Amino acid sequence: MGLAGGLAAMLSATLPLAADEGAGVGAGGEAATIGRIETAWRSWLETGEVSSGTLAISHHGDVIHVVGAGRDGDAPVDLASNSKAITATCLAALVREGALTFDTELGDIAGLDVPEGPLRDVTLAALISHSAGLAPDTTQDNMAGWLNETTPRHDAATAHAFEHGIDSASEGRYVYNNENYAILGAVIDAITDQPHETACATRVLAPAGVTTATLSPRFGAFAAWGGWRMSAADYLRFHAQAFGAESAIGASPATFPRLAIGQGLFYGMGTLYRPNSPKPVFFHTGALCFRGGPNALHYVAAYENGWAVSVAAATCATPERRRALDAALWNAAHE
């Protein structure tokens, strides 16, 4: 499972509409921007010979365009690592409820069998920002064996992380590792005494008006770090609720766990962001790639000008292809 983000060069060209596609348009300048974004998306699909994909577009929090290529645009899509934002905002809800704080240490959470040593001092904030020092990422070796399961494997992944412990050379640095969010999933289970999917759907998905969210039948075992699915439009609804200008995180991201990772970027609350003006740009790519498949990619970006996109494709895109998607959609939304 991987992550990508960045801004690069623009692509062009189009693909014909498939028979199962639906489309909606805004008025005036909205229609022009929608057209540019969709053209850029179709070009990216065509360039990569990707036959199945979904695009949803919102403007100032309202979903105004949903379209599919070779599939129903309203069908649920696998979110891969964009599931992490659900987990992080679910933790934030528990903080608001007073169940814990971001500075709560693993050793203080009842129900977690944390071994003696540095792991007991790891805070939830460090896990959220991938700076706890966990290494290596054992999920990369184990996920293929957990395919097509719908029961979360938080406990197993957490046990592996606790077995190898902290790498002192990585502690305090940004080291992307799914185990961080597997442990957060186990924390949510322990604190709420509910399954992860129930606790988080109640706290962060239902309030956003999301109706299509479930754990994936293919990747559900990766729940807290990569196992959710929902429609591309519903992810925009969740994203606006979690990171929009009127949200606590969107209004003041520096008050939540985060880590500077270079080039003006921060990682925090399950997403990348850049503190642009007049508001931050939040974006993130999730990818699940397995030899022989199944593969899934999901990309989301919410720009400072009020436009946001949610893109899904059944492909294992290279980092270069992911950066190309970033760039094409950014340019289309800002032209």
Image (cartoon, rainbow, N blue to C red):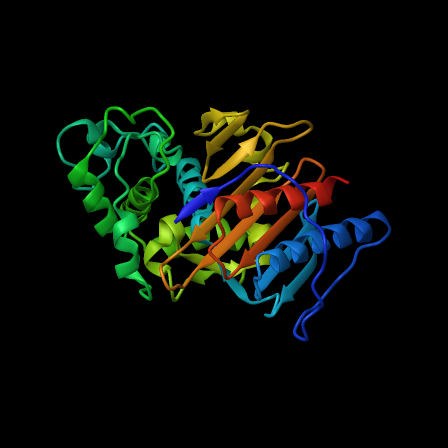
Which residue is located at x 25 percent, y 53 percent?
142
User: Relative to 249, does residue 178 appear above or below in the rendering?
Assistant: below
Which residue is located at x 59 percent, y 45 percent?
324
- Where is residue 301 drawn, in percent x and y? 60, 43
Closer to us: 131 or 101: 131
- Where is residue 194 drawn, in percent x and y? 32, 54
Which residue is located at x 51 percent, y 36 percent?
272
- Where is residue 187 drawn, in percent x and y? 29, 43
- Residue at the extreme right: 28
- Residue at the extreme bottom: 19
- Where is residue 174 drawn, in percent x and y? 38, 29
Q: State which quadrant residue 227 falls in.
A: bottom left
- Residue at the extreme left: 116
Closer to us: 120 or 21: 21
Image quarter hosting the C terminus: top right
Q: State which quadrant residue 201 falls in.
A: bottom left
The answer to whether residue 97 of the structure is visible from this angle is yes
The answer to whether residue 210 of the structure is visible from this angle is no
In this rendering, position of residue 24 left or right of residue 82: right
User: Relative to 324, does residue 215 appear above or below in the rendering?
Assistant: below
How many numbered circles does the render carry?
A: 0
Which residue is located at x 32 percent, y 39 percent?
180
